[in-house]
Image: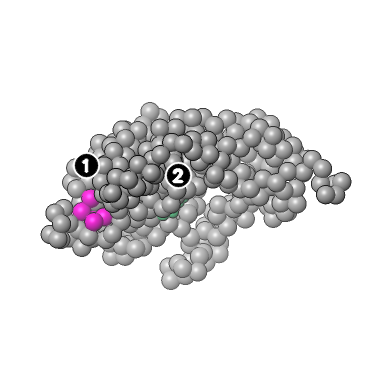
């Protein structure tokens, strides 16, 4: 159109159809086969996915659910954590981590992050009281939290450990996959997640047969046998079409993961701008690059500059849970978690997704280096 637009690209924050188109035939076939099967909820596809996903994570059991939030909510419920109980949770996280706790009537107790944006394990112990029942470890942005230290604390104080793995499919700490360190691992397959479905869905994994049986009942109105409702449950069932689609995606997850890692590596080695702080990788922790977060003092200015150059970015997350309107009743105010609040004002997420072209990646790098 205009001369100054020559050489300018338009890059969305996500472009989910790219991943679909790469294996279109397989996804299409999975849907059609399921439609033709005449069985749409709690069937063969769901069972097959649960088995494959448990194998992939290295857990004994998996239960497919409606969403990542349901995974968290039902995890606390299965452990009888509720009113009067406290759960330690990172202050720097997505609000769903906290809702899983408060949905059960329990109280979230926030802990500031470390330089890797995950919970600062040196600040957990001072928050443990006689009411503390569990620690929720969140592996934010795709990088495992320091699970060894968290595990030591849960053993010392006899607490449960639940893991929010909504952003960390397949990431490891030392030689164990996230989701297998705690009592229950909670996953989301929301479309933008690394292992994303084509609608809402989630799952829990566990090695504990009792927990497995209980969550299987909870997701289906509290019944094992139809119309025999033993406990009060909900409707949170992974449907057959999503399960069939997830089976296809899981079969390609190895390549998806490599692709995300290579984009991240390109950003890390080639972004050179003294105003931009790149993400750090923790020793012994694996990063699966759900999000590529950089930090900069004048964040809104950078975001506008990138947008003016056609690059859409996002903030994960602009308002920490303790300052959200929804949690006003907890009584927190600005300044209570200064590290988290500073992050909320200085972080920005760059596009990183399946099917990005080299041209797009390089354009983003060059544009940032010129900032
Ligand atoms: C996405 C997400 C969830 C919730 O998953 P849904 O499937 O959207 O319910 C929970 N925790 C974290 C950290 C997430 O990123």
SS state under label 1: loop
Classed neighbour count for the residue bearing mark 1: other residues with Cα under 10 Å, few (<14), some (14–19), many (≥20): few
Residue 226: x %, y % from top left: 15, 57
Q: In this orientation, which residue lies closer to the viewer: 35 or 147?
A: 35
Up-down relation of residue 222 to residue 144 (above or below): below
Is 345 left, or right, of 365 in this rendering? left
Where does the image place residue 159, in percent across and percent down from the top left?
28, 48
Decide if ligand 1 comes within 8 Å of the CB at mark 2.
Answer: no
Mark 2 crowdedness (10 Å alpha carbons): few <14, some 14-19, many ≥20: many
The image position of residue 4, as x and y in percent, is: 85, 47
Q: Does the stretch in magenta take in 218?
A: yes
Mark 2–mark 1 distance (CA, rounded to whole Å): 26 Å
Mark 2 or 1, which is nearer the eye? 2
**Residue that appears at 43% across and 46% down:** 197
Placement of the C terminus among the 4 image quadrants? top right
Q: Pick whichever, 101 or 111, lies toward us.
A: 101
Prevailing SS of the magenta stretch: helix
| Residue 214 within the magenta-colored segment of the rendering | no
Q: Is residue 70 above or below residue 19?
A: below
Q: Which residue is mark 2?
A: 196
Image: magenta residue range: 216-220
Of mark 2 and mark 1, the one earlier in the sequence is 2
Q: Which residue is painted at 38% across and 47% down in the image?
A: 242
What residue occupies the far front of the structure in this picture? 36
Measuring 77% from the left and 43% from the top, which residue is drawn there?
8
Q: Is residue 159 left or right of residue 360?
A: left
Above/below status of 104 relative to 202: below
Q: Locate residue 263, reporting x and y percent.
A: 60, 33
Residue at the outermost right position: 3
Q: Residue at x 58, y 46 (%)?
A: 14
Is 146 placed left or right of 55 in the picture? right
What residue is disc 1 on?
Answer: 208
């Amino acid at each position: 159109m205009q001369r100054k637009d020559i050489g300018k690209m338009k890059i969305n924050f996500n472009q989910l159809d790219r991943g679909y188109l790469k294996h279109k035939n397989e996804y299409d076939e999975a849907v059609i086969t399921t439609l033709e099967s005449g069985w749409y909820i709690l069937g063969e596809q769901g069972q097959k996915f649960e088995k494959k996903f448990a194998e992939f994570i290295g857990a004994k059991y998996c239960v497919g659910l409606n969403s990542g939030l349901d995974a968290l909510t039902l995890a606390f419920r299965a452990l009888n954590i509720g009113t009067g109980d406290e759960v330690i949770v990172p202050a720097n996280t997505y609000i769903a981590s906290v809702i899983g706790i408060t949905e059960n009537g329990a109280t979230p107790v926030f802990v500031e992050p470390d330089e890797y944006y995950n919970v600062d394990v040196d600040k957990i112990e001072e928050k443990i009281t006689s009411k503390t029942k569990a620690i929720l470890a969140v592996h934010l942005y795709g990088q495992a939290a320091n699970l060894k230290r968290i595990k030591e604390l849960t053993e010392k104080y006899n607490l449960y450990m639940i893991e929010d793995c909504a952003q960390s499919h397949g990431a490891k700490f030392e030689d164990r996959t996230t989701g297998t360190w705690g009592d229950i691992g909670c996953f989301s397959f929301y479309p933008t997640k690394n292992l994303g479905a084509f609608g809402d869905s989630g799952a829990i994994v566990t090695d504990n047969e009792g927990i497995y049986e209980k969550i299987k009942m909870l997701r289906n109105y509290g019944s094992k046998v139809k119309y025999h409702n033993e406990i009060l449950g909900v409707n949170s069932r992974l449907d057959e079409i999503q399960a069939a689609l997830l089976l296809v995606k899981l079969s390609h997850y190895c390549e998806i993961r490599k692709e995300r890692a290579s984009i991240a590596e390109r950003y890390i080695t080639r972004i050179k701008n003294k105003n931009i702080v790149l993400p750090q990788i923790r020793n012994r922790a694996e990063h699966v690059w759900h999000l590529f977060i950089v930090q900069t003092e004048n964040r809104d200015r950078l975001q506008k500059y990138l947008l003016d150059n056609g690059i859409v970015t996002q903030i994960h997350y602009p308002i920490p849970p303790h300052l959200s309107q929804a949690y006003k009743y907890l009584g927190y105010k600005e300044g209570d978690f200064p590290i988290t609040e500073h992050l909320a004002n200085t972080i920005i997420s760059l596009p990183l997704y399946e099917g990005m072209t080299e041209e797009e990646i390089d354009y983003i790098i060059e544009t940032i280096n010129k900032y």
